[in-house]
Amino acid sequence: MRLLAIFLAILFTFSGFVAQPLQAASQQQEETEAQQEFGKPKIEMKPFNMALLERGRVRGKVTIYLVLVIEQDGGHEFVRTRLPQLRADFNSALTVLARQRFSISRPIDPDIVKAYLTPYADRRLGGGVISIYVKQALVEPD
């Protein structure tokens, strides 16, 4: 009888150790499924800072925060590897756009920024891989 009690105690102890890794694996799977339910993966880019020039003089500073939403399944790593080239393309494009369209007296229109940057992203990554969103656009006068 005593041997049976010891055997059952050992059995319940070991079954608890076996059940813990299984519970942890099922929780991880639920977390990844929950992340997929909340939306598409996104990448928040570091801010773009540039000088705002009007008539050859520096009139202020422009800071733009962009978010890239990956539209294709499995495209996150593909976009992540091309991010430095994409950042260089966006930086040159935003510099030209700031010279042409931005003013110290007007707010920045996020639709214009999105429409201007989308062809650069499509050329670098392929059409429809990402969507570009302007998270924040600031114009600071000097």
Image (cartoon, rainbow, N blue to C red):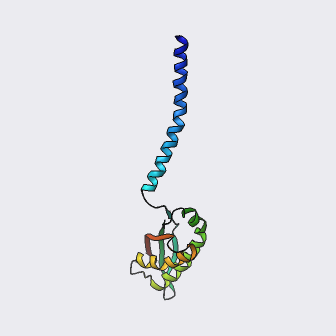
- Quick one: which residue is furthest to the top in this view? 1
Question: How many dots with numbers?
Answer: 0
Q: Residue 121 in the image: x percent, y percent?
A: 53, 74
Q: Residue at x 55, y 27 (%)?
A: 14
Q: Residue at x 47, y 86 (%)?
A: 100
- Quick one: which residue is furthest to the left in this view? 106
Q: Is residue 58 visible?
A: no
Q: Nearer the viewer, residue 38 or 54?
A: 38
Q: Residue 6 in the image: x percent, y percent?
A: 54, 16
Q: Residue 9 in the image: x percent, y percent?
A: 52, 20
Is 100 placed above or below 33 here? below
Q: Is residue 95 visible?
A: yes
138 left or right of 126 in image: left
Which picture quadrant has residue 110?
bottom left
Q: Residue at x 51, y 62 (%)?
A: 73
Q: Residue at x 42, y 55 (%)?
A: 37
Q: Residue 49 in the image: x percent, y percent?
A: 52, 73
Is 6 placed above or below 116 here? above
88 left or right of 62 in image: right
114 left or right of 84 in image: left
